[in-house]
Every structure is written in structure tokens, then in C-alpha cells.
Image (cartoon, grey):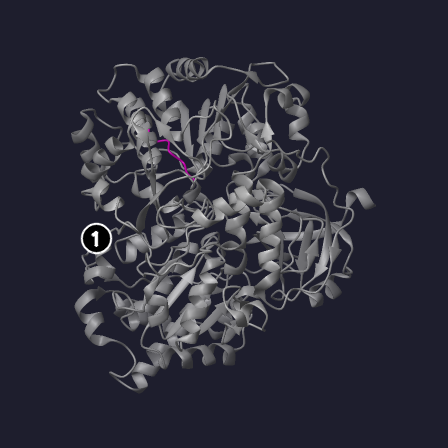
């Protein structure tokens, strides 16, 4: 059965703005999720999918990377509203056939919204756009592979190609993809981590030796205090609210730090509890700090300075001196630096009163076990890496790494984005990984660092990268400086998208373009070796199996593994002694290679087959062993450089709506923020609107200002008066990615600074 997709793009002239929601989830969340499932899948197919979602013998959610409870402790409905939407989006009964592409030229597709493109349904056949053609046409799989192989072999250097990876890729596909790319001869493996948690990995690797979080799900209920910083769990990973609720009921206190009040952090109505379904729910945040955008470094420096002062007043009663002396270095230098911290700079950077910080410090002093969670609200700033290093300083002062109920918790925003990195998807692979790869497969992998996302766009723009292949994702919509990125994509000789759904990256292409349709996470995968399963890694380093339970959307679909191995066979021939056909036939063979190459993955097949899988080793968590350059956890000195915004300007952060996952738009409502029927809105503090002589409801253009003097413009946004921090604003991406300069990136990590863009508001050109 095929369902009809919307034929017309909904306009944004009918935006309705009401009061923000006072709480998250509850019965409205259930009803909203079920409406999506019913409309896209039907009742019976939808129920079959949801009952298998995040279950031991089912499939992992294609949305966020929040972990599941241990087997035997999972709810029958082990999913959230956005997880149900993600399944509805992937398992939809809507189909895109060659007839669709005959009716819609590439230029017409480029004029459509991302929401409309995604609503058209599943891709069903390989499609090819030749140079100069206006439409995609059907192509056989063998011919598609030959087109890619011919173009890759014609390059002057393997480094003239780039191979992108999305976070939804399985461990098996990610490992095989990097094997193909390195056998081809390049480390150009940009991935979505470059745009989200690269800053986390850089800071944590330097300070504790492992670029991943150190806590487990069980640690939440053991914690005395949890910080949730720069993060909106209610929209981006709603199942986290259940863990926070359990912690709160166990006596944990919670501090929310965010420029915007987010419904889920304030009150949670758990639909799996009677009190959440029909009652008022539970207040989660004991303290809410409405911090100025980018002020988190100053906040944690102020907290750390106060802790050091308290230790001087009460020697031996505040800091964990035994832990510091046994396991760390650099505390003396850090303490000396923080003694010079300016209170005026802290106030300017954070927008917080001294008493607000003092109240939080009192909670810290009353807490033995502390967790700090964060997401992209911390990682997409110029000083993201110093900010996360300062959070590590905070935890180290009181011994809160390697202790149950305590530690660092970067919350990844996409299923298996962390697993991709574990499997070798990285432009800067460590030598030990390349050594093991060479020993396992008998070839010499390239050693020179490759290109990350930002450098890939620069290289495409400058003509240094000529072929681009994306394993999932929506590169064009996800990247910064949209005009620059799109012009760079159009310069390519060939762009290749391995995809399940249509998105903007299929409409903004190289001179030649291929769409290679893949099986989704929800679908049964049968290869020559029989039924297959894949594995994924969650935010807390747990690896487990995933098995789809629905018939494929089309008989022409191939698995990601089959597509990668087909590309590798066609491109490499006999160049390397890899049994690509065998890997595609039986994923257990891939897992055998992973077990011998990837640290911590010995006996991978056996451990992955266990109910609930296994947890990868994490020395700081497991034994307070810190594999840094000094062999100890490292306190760091981090310069506070306050971002001062000129008069009449605002500091903008890009955010998701509640009807959105990454660049996938499920609908045009954000009921938690009170917005319906549209996305082109900008949230601004009412006092700032008064100072700017702009009224709630006015139409404005957003114009970003940066050092290069280019005025980047996002036109025609409705102003919404909203209780965000003074001097700050927020708007949805990808619509505002055009405002983010390509060269405005975080120090060290090179992550785009999408959360701190200086803008001015001008009357909308279309309304003048």
C-alpha cells in the first residue's frame, strides 16, 4: 500500500504564536506521536514498529543516541515522541518512484522546502543526473557503481575525493566505509561529529584521555547533583527526561543552564506514569540559570574560583585532595589563574547575578557526586573547547570522575554518531588504529590528516575536491554558510548520496549526481549469508544489536553494507586483498575484523549477540586511569575572552523546533515554544525588542555580522517576544545556517560557531 504525499509546499504566512508550554510530554506528546505514526504507517504497521523500537530483539531508534535501560527493565513503550516520529518518517508508506523525478526537475526540487522534500516518502530506485540534464533518470546498480568508480579513478589524487558519514550509519557499515576510503588512499572522512561534538572529543581527550562520556545510565539515580547545560532534552532526546525524573525522585538536585527556558527541564509529565498522564508531572530543575549565550566558560570559572576560595577558608573540607594528588596535574597553575578572574567579566559574560552563582555553589558544596551533561549549546562556540575543559576542572576539583554517580556526560544527538568515530570514521585517525588496519588487511593506509567538514567545503569551493560521497545525512542543509556550501557543491564533478529519504542534498548537486537508495534501520536485511543484524553505540559507550522488522520499501533497495562493498569492488578491483563480496554477504565477517582492529572490541560478535550488548572500556571511568600525554588527568588554564556585542546587535543561537530532528522536519509546529504553522521565527527578549523599537509580530530580516564584512541575510522572519536571556536571540536551523560564516569556527575543534552569531534585525525587504 502506498500513501499519498502532500503535493504543495505549505506557506508560512499563517504562523500562529501562543504561550510556551508549561511542561513537556504528557498525553499531548502521546497523541502527537501517534498522529504521525498513523498518517505515515497506518495503525497496524505502526504498532508493529513501535513495539520493536529500542527492544532487545528489535531495532535501535534512528533518532538520538540516548541509551536504553538494561534488558528486563525496559518499558513496553521504550520510545519517546520524537522517536516515534523518526520511525514514522523512515517507515512511511509514501514512495518516490522514477515518475516523481520525471515530474520534478532538479531546479524545481531546489525551490521546495526541506519539509516538503522529506514528506514525499522513501526513495525506491537508484537515480542518476547526467551533466547538463535537468532531471534524474533511473540507473542500474552496476552502472551506478561504474560511474562512481570511473570518476574516482580519473582523479589526479585520492585526496580530490571526500567521503562524508552521517550518524545513523551502523558500526559495520562505518568500519567498511573507512576501510574502502583508506584503501582508496585518503583520510578525507568528514562526518557529522565535526559539526556537533568535535569540541567535546577534543577537550576530553586532552584532559582525561578519552573523548567520550564517563557515566552510565545507572549513575543518574546515584548522583547528588546533575547539571544540564546548553541542552534541551525535551526536544532533542526526550527519553533523558525519564532518567532525570528517576534521579529527582531519588533525591538528586538538578541545575538547568540555558539561555532559553525549556519546557522539559522545568516540568516533565511522564506519560508512562499516572501522575504524568493526567497530573501536573514533576518539576525537574531546582535552579534555572538563564545564562547569556556563550557564558558557560565564565560560569564554571566563577564556580571553580569560589570552590578554591572555600577550600582556603576550610582546608581539606572542600576539594578532594587525595584524588587531586594521586591522579591529576596542573591544579596549581589553574588555581593561580582563577585568582585573577574578574567578577565584572563574569557578570558581562553570563548575564547572571552573583547571588545566582552563589546559590549553585551551595548546591555543589552539599553534593558529593556530580554529573555535568551538555550538548550543542556548549560545543558550537568559538571557545567551546576551553569551556568543556573548564567543566572537567570543576569535576576534578572534587574527584567527580571515576566515581559512581559522577562524571562527564556529552549527550550525542544522533544514533551511532559515537560509534562511527569508534569504527574509524575520522579525518585524523590515531596511528595505532592505522597500524592495526594495516596488519589486518595488508595494505598501507594513508597517514596524512584528511579534511573535516569545514575544510571539505573549503576544498570543494576552491576546486581541490572534485567528488563527494555521502553515506546518509543531508550535508547541504547541515553545513554552515549555505550560499558558499551550495556553490561549492555545484562545482563538483560528481556528488553521490546514499539515502533513504529525499532532502536538499539531492537538489543541490555536482555536475553529475547519483542517488543510491538504502535500507532503513526499521527494515529486514537479508543478504546471501542469510538474515543480518547491525550494531550501534549509544552516548554512554554501550554497543548493542539492531534488527529491523519491516519489509523493505522497495525490492530495489540495498543495504548500506552492500552499497559500500559494491562501490569498493568497482573502484579498487584487486588493489587490496579484501573480500568485499563476503563482507556484504555476512556482516559477522565484518565484526570479526572489527574485533581485531578496534580497541575494546575483542570477541565483538559474541558480545554483540548478548541481550543488551556490551559496554566499551573507558579507563577514567573504570579504574581512574587517565591515558593522557602525562598519564594523569589534566587541569587546564582557560582564558576568558568575553564576547561583547555592539550596541543594537543581538547574539543568535540556532536551535531545533520540537517537530524536528537535525535537518529532518517532521512538521511545522513547536508547541513547547508556542509556535504553530511555520518555522521562520526569531525569539527575542521583550526588553531588547523595546530597545530596538521592534514589535512582537514584526517581520524582519536577520543579517549576520562577522570579521569578513560580508552581510549574510536570512529573510522574512516573524519576531516572537520570548523570555530568552537579555541581548540574545534564537531561530531554527537549517533556515539560519546561511548566517554562520564558514570561517567562524571553534578554536581547536574547527566546529562551526552556530550558537554564537552576531546579528542585526532589519525590516524585511519583502515587507518594505
Q: Is residue 323 magenta?
A: no
Name the outermost residue toward the front: 44
Q: Is residue 16 left or right of residue 451?
A: right
Q: Is residue 177 left or right of residue 483?
A: left
The answer to whether residue 677 is above or below residue 107 is below
User: Which residue shows up at 59% across the image and 70% down it?
Assistant: 278
Q: Is residue 386 left or right of residue 740?
A: left
Magenta stretch: give its range. 186-191
Secondary structure mainly formed by the magenta segment? loop
- In what quadrant of the picture does the C terminus appear? top right
In the rendered picture of this protein, how many numbered marks are placed on residues?
1
Quarter residue 663 falls in: top right
- In what quadrant of the picture does the N terminus appear? top right
Closest to the observer, 603 or 714: 603
Name the outermost residue toward the right: 768
Q: Indicate the position of residue 394 as horizontal and vertical percent values.
A: 35, 69
Q: Is residue 363 visible?
A: yes
Q: Indicate the position of residue 104 as horizontal and vertical percent values.
A: 67, 23
The answer to whether residue 43 is above or below residue 221 is above
Q: Indicate the position of residue 82 as horizontal and vertical percent values.
A: 53, 51
Closest to the observer, 335 or 680: 680
Q: Indicate the position of residue 349 as horizontal and vertical percent values.
A: 52, 66
Q: Is residue 393 visible?
A: no
| Residue indicated by mark 1 | 629
Closest to the observer, 424 or 361: 424
Closest to the observer, 752 or 439: 439
Quarter residue 582 falls in: top left
User: Which residue shows up at 35% across the image and 80% down it?
Assistant: 309
Residue at disc 1, secondary structure? loop
Q: Is residue 188 magenta?
A: yes
Tell me the crowding category of disc 1: few under 14, some 14 to 19, or many 20 or more residues within 10 angstroms, Cα based: few
Amino acid at each position: 500500500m502506498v500513501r499519498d504525499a502532500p503535493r504543495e509546499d505549505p506557506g508560512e504566512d499563517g504562523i500562529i504564536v501562543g504561550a510556551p508550554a508549561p511542561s513537556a510530554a504528557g498525553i499531548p506528546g502521546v497523541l502527537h506521536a501517534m498522529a504521525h505514526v498513523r498518517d505515515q504507517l497506518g495503525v497496524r504497521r505502526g504498532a508493529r514498529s513501535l513495539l520493536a523500537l529500542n527492544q532487545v530483539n528489535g531495532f535501535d531508534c534512528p533518532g538520538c543516541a540516548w541509551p536504553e535501560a538494561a534488558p528486563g527493565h525496559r518499558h513496553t513503550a521504550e520510545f519517546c515522541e520524537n522517536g516515534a516520529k523518526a520511525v514514522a518518517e523512515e517507515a512511511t508508506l509514501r514512495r518516490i518512484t522514477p515518475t516523481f523525478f520525471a515530474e520534478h526537475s532538479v531546479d524545481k526540487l531546489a525551490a521546495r522546502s526541506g519539509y516538503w522534500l522529506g514528506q514525499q516518502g522513501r526513495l525506491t530506485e537508484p537515480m542518476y543526473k547526467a551533466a547538463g540534464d535537468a532531471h534524474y533518470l533511473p540507473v542500474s546498480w552496476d552502472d551506478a557503481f561504474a560511474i562512481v568508480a570511473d570518476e574516482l579513478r580519473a582523479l589526479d589524487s585520492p585526496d580530490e575525493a571526500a567521503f562524508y558519514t552521517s550518524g545513523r550509519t551502523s558500526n559495520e557499515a562505518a568500519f567498511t566505509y573507512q576501510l574502502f576510503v583508506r584503501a582508496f588512499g585518503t583520510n578525507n572522512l568528514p562526518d557529522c561529529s565535526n559539526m556537533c561534538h568535535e569540541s567535546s572529543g577534543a577537550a576530553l581527550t586532552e584532559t582525561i584521555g578519552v573523548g567520550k562520556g564517563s557515566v552510565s545510565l545507572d549513575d543518574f539515580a546515584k548522583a547528588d547533583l546533575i547539571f544540564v547545560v546548553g541542552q534541551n532534552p525535551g526536544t532533542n532526546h526526550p527519553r533523558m527526561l525519564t532518567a532525570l525524573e528517576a534521579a529527582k525522585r531519588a533525591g538528586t538536585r538538578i541545575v538547568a543552564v540555558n539561555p532559553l527556558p525549556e519546557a522539559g527541564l522545568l516540568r516533565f509529565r511522564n506519560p508512562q506514569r499516572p501522575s504524568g498522564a493526567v497530573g501536573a508531572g514533576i518539576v525537574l530543575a531546582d535552579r534555572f540559570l538563564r545564562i547569556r549565550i556563550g557564558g558557560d566558560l565564565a560560569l564554571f570559572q566563577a564556580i571553580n574560583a569560589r570552590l578554591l576560595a572555600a577550600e582556603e577558608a576550610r582546608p581539606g573540607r572542600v576539594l578532594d585532595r587525595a584524588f587531586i594528588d594521586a591522579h591529576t596535574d596542573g591544579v596549581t597553575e589553574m588555581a593561580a589563574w582563577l585568582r585573577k578572574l574578574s567578577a565584572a567579566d563574569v557578570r558581562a559574560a553570563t548575564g547572571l547575578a552573583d547571588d545566582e552563582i552563589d546559590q549553585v555553589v551551595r548546591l555543589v558544596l552539599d553534593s558529593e557526586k556530580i554529573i555535568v551533561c551538555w550538548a550543542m549549546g556548549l560545543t558550537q562556540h568559538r571557545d567551546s573547547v576551553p569551556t568543556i575543559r573548564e567543566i572537567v576542572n570543576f569535576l576534578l576539583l572534587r574527584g567527580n570522575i571515576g566515581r559512581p554517580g559522577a562524571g562527564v556526560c556529552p549527550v550525542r544527538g544522533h544514533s551511532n554518531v559515537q560509534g562511527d568515530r569508534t569504527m574509524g570514521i575520522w579525518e585524523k585517525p590515531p596511528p595505532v588504529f592505522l597500524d592495526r588496519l594495516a596488519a589486518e588487511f595488508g595494505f598501507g593506509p594513508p597517514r596524512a590528516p584528511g579534511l573535516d567538514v569545514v575544510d571539505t567545503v573549503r576544498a570543494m569551493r576552491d576546486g581541490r575536491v572534485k567528488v563527494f560521497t555521502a553515506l546518509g545525512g543531508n550535508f547541504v542543509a547541515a553545513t554552515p554558510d549555505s550560499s558558499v556550501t551550495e556553490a561549492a557543491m555545484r562545482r563538483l564533478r560528481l556528488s553521490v548520496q546514499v539515502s533513504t529519504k529525499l532532502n536538499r542534498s539531492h537538489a543541490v548537486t555536482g555536475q553529475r549526481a547519483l542517488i543510491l537508495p538504502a535500507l532503513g534501520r526499521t527494515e529486514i536485511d537479508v543478504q546471501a549469508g542469510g538474515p543480518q543484524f547491525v550494531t550501534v553505540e549509544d552516548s554512554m559507550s554501550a554497543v548493542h544489536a539492531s534488527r529491523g522488522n519491516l519489509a523493505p520499501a522497495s525490492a530495489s533497495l540495498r543495504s548500506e553494507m552492500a552499497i559500500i562493498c559494491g562501490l569498493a569492488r568497482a573502484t579498487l578491483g584487486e588493489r587490496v586483498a579484501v573480500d568485499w563480496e563476503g563482507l556484504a554477504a555476512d556482516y559477522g565477517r565484518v565484526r570479526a575484523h572489527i574485533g581485531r582492529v578496534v580497541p575494546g572490541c575483542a570477541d565483538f560478535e559474541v558480545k554483540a549477540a548478548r541481550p543488551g550488548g556490551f559496554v566499551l572500556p573507558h579507563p577514567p571511568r573504570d579504574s581512574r586511569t587517565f591515558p593522557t600525554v602525562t598519564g594523569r588527568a589534566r587541569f587546564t588554564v582557560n582564558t576568558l575572552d568575553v564576547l561583547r556585542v555592539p550596541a543594537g546587535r543581538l547574539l543568535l543561537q540556532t536551535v531545533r523546533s520540537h517537530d524536528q530532528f537535525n535537518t529532518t522536519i517532521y512538521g511545522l509546529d513547536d508547541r513547547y515554544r508556542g509556535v504553530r504553522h511555520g518555522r521562520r521565527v526569531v525569539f527575542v527578549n521583550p526588553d531588547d525588542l523595546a530597545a530596538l523599537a521592534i514589535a512582537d509580530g514584526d517581520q524582519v530580516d536577520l543579517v549576520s555580522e562577522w570579521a569578513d564584512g560580508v552581510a549574510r541575510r536570512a529573510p522574512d522572519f516573524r519576531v516572537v517576544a520570548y523570555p530568552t536571556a537579555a541581548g540574545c536571540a534564537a531561530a531554527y536551523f537549517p533556515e539560519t545556517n546561511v548566517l554562520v560564516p564558514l570561517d567562524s569556527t571553534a578554536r581547536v575543534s574547527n566546529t562551526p560557531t552556530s550558537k554564537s552569531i552576531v546579528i542585526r534585525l532589519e525590516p524585511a525587504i519583502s515587507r518594505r
